Image: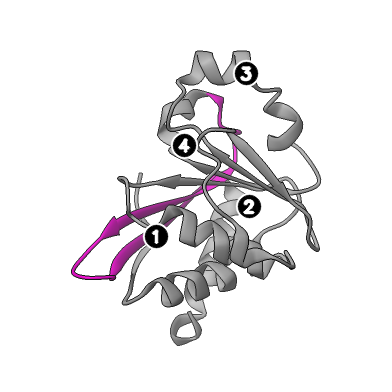
Amino acid sequence: MKIGREIKTASPEETLSLAEKFSSVLRAGDLVALRGNLGSGKTVFVKGLAKGLGVKDYRYVNSPSFVVIKEYPGKMPLYHFDVYRLDSRGFCETMDYEKYFYSTGVTAVEWADKIQELLPEEYFEVFMEPGEENSRTIGFTAVGEDAKRRLDVFLASGEDI
């Protein structure tokens, strides 16, 4: 898959701000597949999505590693999955995931590559890679025509990102 654009952030605050801005293109039923190694900033990115989606206590968003999912009310609900400890079979046996993936909220999935075959036909992908100190390289791509169009609009906003 081709990454639409890579953006470098210099701090967790910049990563959070970028995700907050990215949330402006998200609609009910969208899924954001987050990929990256441990410590790459996936949870900070989800915290920024939460802020952008109007989650009042976005600062308290943390990884649902042991509970698999956390739900946050906002302008749109945010469903935050962490599937690090599961494979697709375990995920299917543990969760009624379709009720979240095709819902009235936005779903963010950390370690989405572990359940690749379960992802919807259309979604956004965010690739995260840590750099020096607190910097990150964040790559965006989209699967599906509508998602690609909305991602292009976001990426075209240029310096506002």
Instruction: Say whether residue 138 is magenta.
Output: yes
N-term-proximal mark, 4 vs 1: 1
Label drawn at residue 4: 1
Cα–Cα span, label 4 and label 1: 18 Å
Residue occupying the point 59% across, 33% down: 67
Cα–Cα span, label 4 and label 3: 16 Å
Horizontal arrangement in the rendering, residue 123 relative to residue 161 (left or right): right
In the rendered structure, which amino acid carries the disc numbered 3? Thr
N-term-proximal mark, 2 vs 3: 3
In the rendered structure, which amino acid carries the disc numbered 1? Gly
Mark 3 and mark 4 in contact (Cβ < 8 Å)?
no
Provide residue 148's location: percent of width, then percent of height.
54, 55
The secondary structure making up most of the magenta span is strand
Label drawn at residue 112: 4
Label 3: which secondary element: helix
Mark 1 and mark 2 in contact (Cβ < 8 Å)?
no
Task: Name the residue nearer the viewer: 146 or 106.
Answer: 106
Q: Tally the numbered discs.
A: 4
In the rendered structure, which amino acid carries the disc numbered 4? Ala
Cα–Cα span, label 2 and label 1: 14 Å
Cα–Cα span, label 4 and label 2: 20 Å
Q: Is residue 75 visible?
A: yes
The range drawn in magenta is 118-143
N-term-proximal mark, 4 vs 3: 3
N-term-proximal mark, 3 vs 1: 1
Q: Is residue 84 above or below residue 4?
A: above
N-term-proximal mark, 4 vs 2: 4
In the rendered structure, which amino acid carries the disc numbered 2? Asp
Label drawn at residue 94: 3
Instruction: Say whether residue 125 is magenta.
Output: yes
Provide residue 143's location: percent of width, then percent of height.
51, 44
Label 2: which secondary element: helix
